[in-house]
Image (cartoon, rainbow, N blue to C red):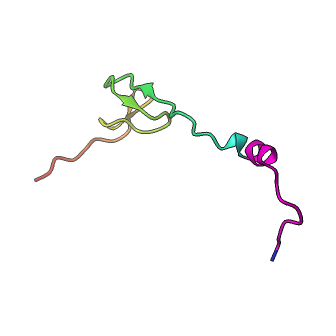
């Protein structure tokens, strides 16, 4: 099993973790419904990039 030969200093440990910050979600406004959504996803009404992709079926 790999074991470090020397203790990693606090400075080097923190530099190693420098890229682990949480990034905010990229939220866009849907052009057809006006709702907030993630990019490259189908909207609630079934449209994608302003075009209807599928029609929701009514529950019976």
Identify whether 55 is placed above or below 50. Answer: below
The residue sitting at 14% across, 51% down in the picture is 59
| Quadrant showing the N terminus | bottom right
The residue sitting at 53% across, 33% down in the picture is 24
- Residue 32, how many percent across, how many down? 34, 24
Tell me, yes or no, whether the highlighted magenta stretch contains residue 14.
yes
Instruction: Please name whichever residue, 18 or 53, is drawn nearer the observer in this view of the structure.
Output: 18
- Residue 54, how many percent across, how many down? 33, 41
Identify whether 25 is placed above or below 17. Answer: above
Instruction: Please name whichever residue, 12 or 35, is drawn nearer the observer in this view of the structure.
Output: 12
Q: Residue furthest right?
A: 5
Residue 34, quarter of picture: top left
Residue 8, quarter of picture: bottom right
The residue sitting at 10% across, 53% down in the picture is 60
Number of marks:
0
Q: Residue furthest bottom?
A: 1
Tell me, yes or no, whether the highlighted magenta stretch contains residue 40.
no
Identify whether 34 is placed above or below 17. Answer: above
- Residue 12, how many percent across, how many down? 81, 46
**Residue 3 placement, left or right of 19:** right
The residue sitting at 77% across, 47% down in the picture is 10
The boundaries of the magenta stretch are: 2-16
């Amino acid at each position: 099993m790999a074991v470090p030969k020397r203790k990693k200093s606090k400075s080097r440990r923190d530099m190693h973790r420098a890229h682990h910050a949480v990034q905010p979600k990229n939220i866009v406004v849907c052009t057809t419904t006006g709702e907030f959504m993630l990019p490259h996803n189908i909207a609630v009404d079934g449209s994608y990039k302003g075009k209807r992709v599928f029609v929701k079926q009514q529950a019976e």
